[in-house]
Structures are given as structure tokens and as C-alpha cells.
Amino acid sequence: MAEQKSTNITWQERVVDRAAREAHLKQRGVTIWLTGLSGSGKSTVAVAVEKMLMDQGRLAYVLDGDNIRHGLNSNLGFSPEDRTENIRRIGEVAKLFTDAGVIVLTSFISPYRADRDAVRAKMQAGDFVEVYVSADVPTCESRDVKGLYAKARAGQIPEFTGISAPYEAPEKPELVLDTANQTVEESAGKLIQYLRDKGYILAK
Amino acid sequence: MAEQKSTNITWQERVVDRAAREAHLKQRGVTIWLTGLSGSGKSTVAVAVEKMLMDQGRLAYVLDGDNIRHGLNSNLGFSPEDRTENIRRIGEVAKLFTDAGVIVLTSFISPYRADRDAVRAKMQAGDFVEVYVSADVPTCESRDVKGLYAKARAGQIPEFTGISAPYEAPEKPELVLDTANQTVEESAGKLIQYLRDKGYILAK
């Protein structure tokens, strides 16, 4: 690794650190990791929170299937190894955004506890906020916005989370959003209140 | 890919877009891609620019060997394929930061023109600014801060760029910083002036 390390000359002298960026942005960088079944409302909540935060003059950014699967992870398939690598890379990117001072919201089913815990383990305490977007299969299936549950039931999608593949719910998430029983606005508001209570959003 | 795509429900409705983030940050997101030999001054210039921009109330972030090689790309080696994948992933991450409205500076030797051009090709026009940090081998070797050139000359580092592996200089970089003949401050100032002239930094 010698050659690559030659680019690291100034690491020790790094003068603009995370604290300076956070002071400038009036917020603490953090990864809000949304996990839940397909159709549970992860992306809807993520985008709502992003908008609310921006309206309040904060910098938030959503990582989701659109900007990850077709870009960074376009060379990954759906084998168990690739699914794990998919989550690992997303975790590493979220960590960079967090270091940059951004409130980053990740919106992926991320069904395996071990994969999510591996991301948490690589972050500093307080930098990883696991949010369980909780809605049971019947609820998600009744929404079935894209008809995926119907296809899964018809056997057209192998290993569909919640139908033919497991979903491992978080055991100790920082927050649970019960999207089956509250509106998107209520869920988003609850998440923002959490960020405020825990000091991720600083006074302006 | 059906299951993953289920997370994309709200893409069309995405209400917080890049323009809103850029208006908030008073800057245009952009990838400043620094390329040059080991010891040419890429990281030194990147960190200096980052500090100057932060002092001016802008949001900049440096991607370099420290935060990439030990994280996102920790599972890559130094084979030709892995080197290409290394640059590809860095490009994709830079693209995400650019979309987030950040001025991101990447500091990697990135010796192959094809790899750099592939990153440029995936970005929108104006989002990729290639900066050739130009210093010839004798200059870089005379600095040899980490003794890498000495090791390379002694045959202890195989395929060392500029000694035993090629460096393909950019043919049409947006900017050339002649670090052999100007100070770090001059180089950093020239880069910031470019950002100002081209409208990446908006009036406050």
C-alpha cells in the first residue's frame, strides 16, 4: 500500500476538521439508518425529513436505491455476499457524509441485523442512529405501490423480504416509526424531534 | 433488481433537490479531481483549499487515501482491475457529494487517463473539474517526504508511478497547478479563483 499512502502526507496537519464543518452547518453529522420492509415507508419518510430539515436551513441528503444501485453499487448483484457488500459500501459512504457534517438518511431494506451492526461498529458512538420503520407485511402488502408483493406471491420474485426471505427487525433501534399507525408527517416529525432532543441540530 | 427498486417510490416526488441544497449553501456542488505524481502536492493543495473555502463559509470536503483506502476501498488491492475499481468508486462517491451540493476535492494519483475520463463521463457537464497538479519526477523525488521514491529506486516498491509505472498526464485539464514553481498558497488561491470565475461559489 506504500504508493497510495504517499497521498496521506498532510493527514496529521489536517486543519479543517469535522468540528469546524459542523459549527459552520449548525448541526452534527449523523447517519440516520432507516430499515424496514419494502413498502414500509422508508423513502417517503426520508424525503419528508430531508425537506423539513432543508426548510429549517439544515443540510440533509438521502442515499437510496436510485443513487446507489445505479452508481457505486452497479457492479453488485443479489447474492448473499453482494448484499452484504452492498450494505457495507453504503455504510462507508454514509460515514464519509457524516464526517463531512451532513445529516445523511439511508433508505434500504437492509434486512440482516449483522450487516447493520457491522455498519454501526465502524462508526463513532452517536454517529449511527438506527430507525426501524415498522409496518407489518399485511400493511406493506396492502399498499404494494409497485405491485412487488403480488409478484412475490406469484413466485416471480425469488427471495423477497417478508415473503420468501427473512427480515430481522432491530433489537435496540434508537427509534421506531410505526408507519402503519401514523402519518408520514407524524413519523418525520418524530425523527426530527429526536435529532433536536439529542443535540444533532444546534441552535442557530 | 425488483426488490431493491421498491425503495424508489418517491424518486419522482423528490422535493428537495440539488438546486435547493446549492441555494442554501451558496455554492455549486462540484468535484475537483486532483491528479499528479506522488509528492506533487495534491493533498497539501486540497487541504489548503478546503481550509480557505471553510474560512469563507463554504462547505468543502477532501476524499483521500486516508478516508477511502481504509474504508470504502479496504477490500481492494493493487491489481490493474482493483486500481480501476478504486478510482471508479471514488468517482461515484464524489458524484454523490457533488449532488449533495458539496465542493469535494479528491486527492489520488489516479495515473490512468481512461480511469479519470470514465469518472468525467458519468458526471454532468461542469460537475467535474480536472486539476493537474504538475511537478516532474525530479521535483517530487527531491521532496520525497515519506522516502517512497528512495524505496522505489531500491526496487522495494514495484510499479511505483513515475519510476516503474506510467503516469498519464491530463490532455485537457480544466486547470494546471505548477507546484514546482509556486507556493501551496498560490496554487490554492489559483484554484479558488477558478471556482469563483466559473460561478461555483455564489455571492453571499
Image: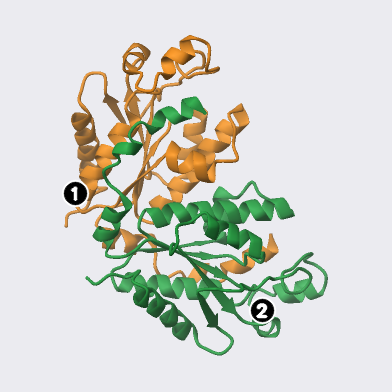
Chain colours: A orange, B green
Left or right: A56 with respect to B16? left
Kindly indicate whether the residues beneath marks 2 and 1 are on one polypeptide chain.
Answer: no
Residue name at image x 68 percent, y 51 percent? B82
Three-letter amino acid code at disc 2? Asp
Q: Note whether residue A152 is visible.
A: yes
Give left or right: position of A38 versus A203: right
Q: Which residue is mark 1?
A: A55
Please provide percent x and percent y for residue B64.
53, 62
Q: Where does label 2 land, which residue?
A: B144
Residue positioned most to the right: B155
Q: Secondary structure at mark 1?
A: helix
Identity of the residue drawn at 51% across and 51% down: B92
Q: Which residue appears at 44% of the width and 43% of the height?
A: A67
Tell me the distance, in whole angstroms, between the alpha carbons under discs 2 and 1.
49 Å
Q: Quadrant of the C terminus of chain A?
A: bottom left
Residue at the bottom extreme of this rendering: B181
Q: Residues within 10 Å of mark 2 (few under 14, many from 20)?
A: some
Q: Quadrant of the N terminus of chain A?
A: bottom right
Q: Chain of mark 1?
A: A
**Image point 47% across, 47% down: which residue?**
A93
- Say above or below: A37 vs B75: above
Under tag 2, what secondary structure? Answer: loop
Q: Amino acid at mark 1?
A: Asp
**Tag 2, which chain?**
B
